Amino acid sequence: MDISVIVPVYGCRAALNELHRRLTESLLKITNDYEIILVNDFCPQNSWEVIEEICEKDKKVVGIELSRNFGQIYAICAGLDKSQGDWVVVMDCDLQDRPEEIINLYNKAQEGYDVVFARRAVRKDSGLKILISKMFYSIYSFATDTKYDPAICNFSIVKRKVVDVYCSMRESHRAYVAYIKWLGFKQTSIDVEHNDRHEGKSSYNFKKRMKMAMEILVSQSDKVLRFTVLLGFIITILSLLGALGLIINYFISNTLSGWTSTIVVLCFFGGIIEMSIGLVGIYVGNIFMQSKGRPLYVIRTIRNGKNK
């Protein structure tokens, strides 16, 4: 198998037939030996019906139905685990990622690269979404001591040896781009055209994005934990200086500060302590979830594929 294309499917039923048509046209310009893997992440629009119809018409399409909604990253992982191509493309199903760009990614990879990311030079997203993305990747870059470009997305082409190593890492909290970048190998990116969504809007609302950001942040770095230690040290020094100032003030003026300032200080320190304990709890909780050893996803049905 020359090329596998992994597409997690959620909330874009109307785009699937057009996606299949354009993918087929684009891939045939490269090779006749390819597969398209559509992973239904328990889409509420019942996209599985459309996927089954496409699988019936085209045996090069593999349909995977997950038993429930596990999330985009895990749907991608399911597709990668089942893929057989020497090169593997990951893209979204809403046609914001243009299938016609695959040939450009492939040609760039032939220059000797193991990973080629698509860089959305001009994004067709809302200003708020772009701002949140930039803020998150700025914090994430600081926490992981690496530099991430918020214009880079999941849309990419990756060599089989990179995919195999990625699939061997079974952490519960995972991020496709972050993990691929962490692996190293020879990587680059190219600018691609970014289209408007074919229908509807993204299911990733602000709450989901913040939850995902926190999970990725605490699972990829302990710098946040070390920051609380530094914060505690700074507050301790300031407290000692404050206490020294109160002692000096007492001997000079023979007076003590009122209760209001005392209560404010106690509340402040109480909040810091609660925050620190909660942060440690998040890290311990991640260890607990990982120690269970549960599968990252559960497959209900496969069409045109092997149950490997």
Image (cartoon, helix red, strand yellow):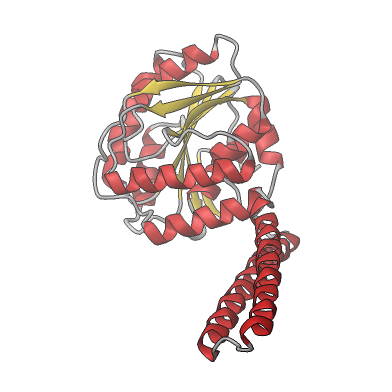
Image vertical order of residue 57 relative to residue 269, above or below: above
Can residue 96 be seen from the camera position used here? Answer: yes
- Seen from the viewer's position, the closer of residues 187 and 95 is 187
Horizontal side of 189 relative to 49 (left or right) equals right
Residue pictured at 50% horizontal, 23% vertical = 34
* Number of callouts: 0
Q: Quadrant of residue 164?
A: top right
Please give the name of the residue rendered at 60% of the width and 32% of the height, measured from the top-left corner: 181
Q: Is residue 69 visible?
A: no
Q: Is residue 207 left or right of residue 247?
A: left
- Residue 193, percent across and down? 32, 25
User: Which quadrant of the structure image shows residue 145?
Assistant: top right
Residue 16 place in picture, x, y as percent: 32, 40
Q: Quadrant of the N terminus?
A: top right
Q: Quadrant of residue 61?
A: top left
Say which of 249 and 263 sits in front: 249
| Residue 217 left/right relative to 150 | right
Q: Nearer the viewer, residue 217 or 245?
A: 245
Kindly give the residue lying farthest to the front in the view shown: 252
Q: Which residue occupies 66% across, 49% down?
A: 221
Q: Nearer the viewer, residue 94 or 182?
A: 182
